Image: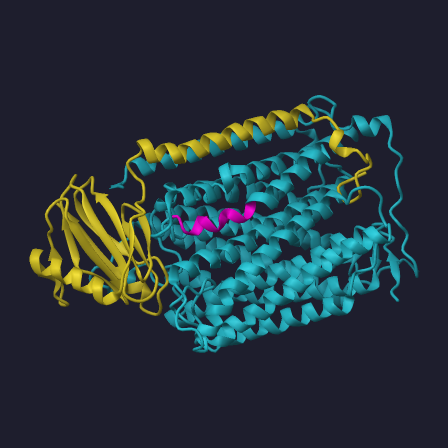
Chain colours: A yellow, B cyan
């Protein structure tokens, strides 16, 4: 008679639906299709889609590429750690290293210009969490992820590591200026 | 030879071997819940910024242990008990191979203790996910592998018991809906545990130096086929429990067997795809893969959950209306036994799982929207709604039913038991809401210090984020008190509760009587618009869902361009 007993009608699959159930299934199905098309449609019409451009890399290779950009476009140094502030030309390739426990270097970008931001980790998994915008991207060692970013506001932005990476995790931060 | 006991309070019949196994697994689960609950104190009191209690290394160790003890050990021990209950007890048959079932239990126990020892030695603070190349001690992985093998043995004992019932003809026709839900859970469990083995065995070999490298991205992809799917075992299990409690408290039968079973079938087909939910912000995986998997293939598993969310209260409404509570839309609900913790726990669980866990889960499982919450504390906010309000609270509600039926004890402190689901459930509601609020403001999960320890580039979180995290602390403590009440009532009843009549014993099982099919039975479900109150509630749910979903798209459209 109930859900903890075998169905009392042996031919339960022939029982008709109640209209409450039928209507709800139809509504829920339509909603599911709307949600699915939102996700697909945003790839066509939306402006925030995560790139999937990825290359295998090694810490040495990526460090060398980052160093080349730093050597070329450093405009000043900041903090007592002398972190270079890199101001690359619009549209160029920008490299950001995530490692135990900082992001290196500091970037200086221009509003409404698009950059190819290359991300990787030198060691463990890290998280690229851009605040206060709240964009969050996983940074995986061995994989160079190329994300095209277009800042739409000026100011000072922080990068917080939001993937647990050991004892210094809570102090791991970076910075991006947008002019 | 085994004996069968017919419980005089519920009419359920227990095989004595199965009864001991159910009891042992449930008690082991509760012990890990206790341990996880004690650890939760450390977690919330550290994340409460004004208290900031534990040192960083202790905090990460405690957080690792809290995750594993709660998400894996408490829940899976209890689930094995549920599987044995749904097979041997509901089908009134002997449990298959009880000795092997005990072997499985022993493996699970050894595994869970081994992993805990590894964590508390301090060298395995790698979080539950243990992403390579960060390494834990070998014993950490070994314990998890042993536990998983034990749980797999449990699943096969469950399948074997189904075969026993079929062969010995202890029931006629199809298995009960609740057993069907348990089969769903067990099928997902097999997939889950196999995925866990595929990735944890090489990682274990890497930790002892026999394998040079496990690729970090492959690890994440396969680990989550284990990590997220194990939460889908919970969904199937606790939804089965909701159906069971609706049947126990109201004599409710499913509005239609076809719809409810069809929804479980959708779970079997699509629910495991959710591995992708954790990889949406990852490099290297194609957009198509992410979109198909994260939506459980066009949201068919979400459809299934929305169906269960309607049919369970709907079944209760139909049963109540048959009893004469027909006034207006909601008399059936007002006159429900709100003082009975079995019902109130289940209903608070159902509403919280749908409104808080379900809506947030679909939002964050949307490929693009995921970028605005990935790895923020919004994520634990979501899964405390699904796993604590959904799974844990349902298990608690079921326990209150099992105390007299299975433990054969009178419940101690019935007044406290009446209060417990409200204290625990409602403080968890508040806890997850403020956690999601903090996540929306960017607060990270698994993070020891949101002030970032004076790092020169530190981000200064807004005051509202600090306020939210303070409220997380307060609500967390309230929920822990609610959890402690559950443990006190359960363990106390088991130890000091008045012994109740055991009931009649027999050497042979009494098969489930066959009810002859009648015209009334066949017409069930075609009564027209049988559950208008539930439909109204479901509409409120859908409106909330649609609004929240599009608010997040609006928010996403304002952030930096990404392509």
Quadrant containing the C terminus of chain B is top left
Give coordinates of residue B273: x percent, y percent. 51, 47
Magenta includes A139? no
Q: Let me know if residue B335 appears in the view.
A: no
Give coordinates of residue B159: x percent, y percent. 72, 56
> Does residue A122 appear left or right of residue A83 in this picture?
right
Query: Which secondary structure is most common in the magenta stretch?
Result: helix
Residue at the image position 46 percent from the left and 53 percent from the top? B380
Q: How many labels does the image show?
A: 0
> Does residue B32 appear left or right of residue B211 in this picture?
right
Residue at the image position 73 percent from the left and 68 percent from the top? B100
Give coordinates of residue A38: x percent, y percent. 40, 32
Magenta part of the chain: B271-280
> Does residue B104 appear left or right of residue B167 in this picture?
left
Residue at the image position 86 percent from the left and 32 percent from the top? B517
Magenta includes B278? yes
Residue at the image position 39 percent from the left and 45 percent from the top? B370
- Give B308 or A7, whichever is nearer the viewer: A7
Asked which quadrant contains residue B549, the reply is top left
- In the rendered view, tell whether residue B449 sits above or below residue B255: below
- In the rendered view, tell whether residue B12 sits above or below residue B540: below
Q: Let me know if residue B550 appears in the view.
A: yes
Quadrant containing the N terminus of chain B is bottom right
- Give B240 or B416, whichever is nearer the viewer: B240
- Give A165 or B522, whichever is nearer the viewer: B522
């Amino acid at each position: 008679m109930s859900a903890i007993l075998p169905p009392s009608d042996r031919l339960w699959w022939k029982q008709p639906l109640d209209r409450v159930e039928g209507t709800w299934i139809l509504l829920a199905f339509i909603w599911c299709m709307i949600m699915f098309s939102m996700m697909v449609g945003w790839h066509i019409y939306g402006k925030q889609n995560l790139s999937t451009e990825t290359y295998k890399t090694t810490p040495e290779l990526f460090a060398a590429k980052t160093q080349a950009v730093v050597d070329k476009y450093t405009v000043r140094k900041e903090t007592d750690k002398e972190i270079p502030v890199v101001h690359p030309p619009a549209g160029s390739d920008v490299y950001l290293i995530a490692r135990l426990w900082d992001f290196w270097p500091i970037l200086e970008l221009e509003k409404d210009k698009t950059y190819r931001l290359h991300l990787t980790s030198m060691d463990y998994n890290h998280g690229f969490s851009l605040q206060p915008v709240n964009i969050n991207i996983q940074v995986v060692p061995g994989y160079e992820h190329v994300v095209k970013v277009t800042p739409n506001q000026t100011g000072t932005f922080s990068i917080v590591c939001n993937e647990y990476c050991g004892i210094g995790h809570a102090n791991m931060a970076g910075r991006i200026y947008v002019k | 030879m085994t004996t069968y006991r017919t419980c005089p309070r519920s009419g359920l019949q227990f095989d004595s071997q199965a009864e001991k196994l159910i009891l042992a697994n449930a008690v082991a689960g509760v012990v890990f819940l206790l341990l996880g609950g004690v650890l939760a104190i450390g977690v919330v009191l550290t994340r409460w910024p004004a208290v900031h209690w534990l040192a960083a290394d202790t905090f990460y160790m405690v957080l690792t242990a809290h995750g594993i003890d709660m998400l894996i050990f408490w829940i899976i021990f209890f689930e094995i008990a549920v599987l044995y209950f749904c097979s041997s007890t509901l089908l009134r048959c002997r449990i298959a191979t009880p000795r092997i079932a005990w072997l499985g239990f022993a493996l699970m126990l050894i595994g869970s203790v081994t992993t805990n020892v590894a964590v508390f030695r301090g060298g395995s603070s790698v979080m539950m996910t243990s992403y390579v190349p960060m390494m834990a001690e070998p014993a950490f992985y070994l314990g998890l592998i042993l536990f998983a093998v034990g749980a797999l043995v449990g699943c096969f004992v469950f399948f074997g018991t189904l075969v026993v019932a079929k062969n010995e003809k202890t029931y006629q026709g199809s298995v009960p809906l609740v057993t069907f839900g348990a089969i769903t859970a067990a099928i997902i469990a097999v997939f889950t545990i196999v995925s866990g083995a595929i990735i944890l065995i090489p990682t274990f070999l890497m930790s002892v130096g026999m394998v040079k490298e496990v690729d970090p991205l492959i690890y994440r992809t396969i680990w989550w086929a284990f990590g997220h799917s194990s939460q889908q075992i919970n969904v199937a299990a606790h939804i089965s429990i909701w159906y069971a409690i609706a049947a126990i408290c109201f004599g409710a039968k499913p509005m239609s067997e076809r719809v409810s079973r069809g929804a479980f079938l959708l779970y079997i087909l699509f629910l495991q795809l959710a591995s992708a939910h954790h990889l949406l912000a990852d490099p290297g995986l194609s957009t198509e893969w992410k979109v198909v998997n994260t939506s459980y293939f066009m949201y068919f598993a979400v459809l299934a959950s929305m169906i269960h969310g309607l049919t369970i209260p709907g079944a209760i409404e139909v049963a109540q209306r048959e009893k004469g509570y027909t006034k207006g839309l909601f008399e059936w609900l007002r006159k429900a036994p709100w003082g009975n913790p079995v019902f109130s726990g289940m209903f608070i669980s159902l509403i919280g799982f749908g409104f808080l866990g379900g809506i947030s889960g679909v939002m964050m499982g949307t490929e693009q929207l995921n970028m605005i919450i990935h790895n923020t504390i919004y994520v634990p906010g979501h899964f405390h709604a699904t796993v604590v309000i959904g799974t844990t609270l349902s298990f608690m509600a079921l326990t209150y039913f099992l105390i007299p039926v299975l433990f054969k004890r009178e419940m101690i402190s019935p007044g406290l038991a009446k209060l417990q689901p409200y204290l625990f459930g409602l403080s968890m509601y508040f806890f997850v809401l403020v956690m999601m609020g903090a996540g929306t403001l960017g607060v990270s999960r698994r993070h020891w210090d949101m002030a970032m320890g004076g790092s020169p580039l530190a981000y200064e979180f807004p005051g509202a984020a600090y306020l939210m995290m303070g409220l997380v602390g307060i609500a967390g403590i309230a929920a822990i008190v609610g959890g402690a009440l559950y443990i006190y009532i359960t363990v106390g009843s088991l130890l000091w509760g008045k012994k109740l009549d055991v009931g009649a014993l027999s050497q042979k099982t009494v098969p489930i009587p066959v009810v002859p099919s009648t015209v009334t039975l066949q017409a069930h479900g075609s009564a027209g618009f049988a559950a208008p109150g539930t439909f109204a509630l479901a509409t409120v749910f859908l409106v909330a869902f649609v609004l929240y979903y599009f608010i997040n798209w609006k928010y996403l459209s304002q952030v930096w361009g990404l392509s």
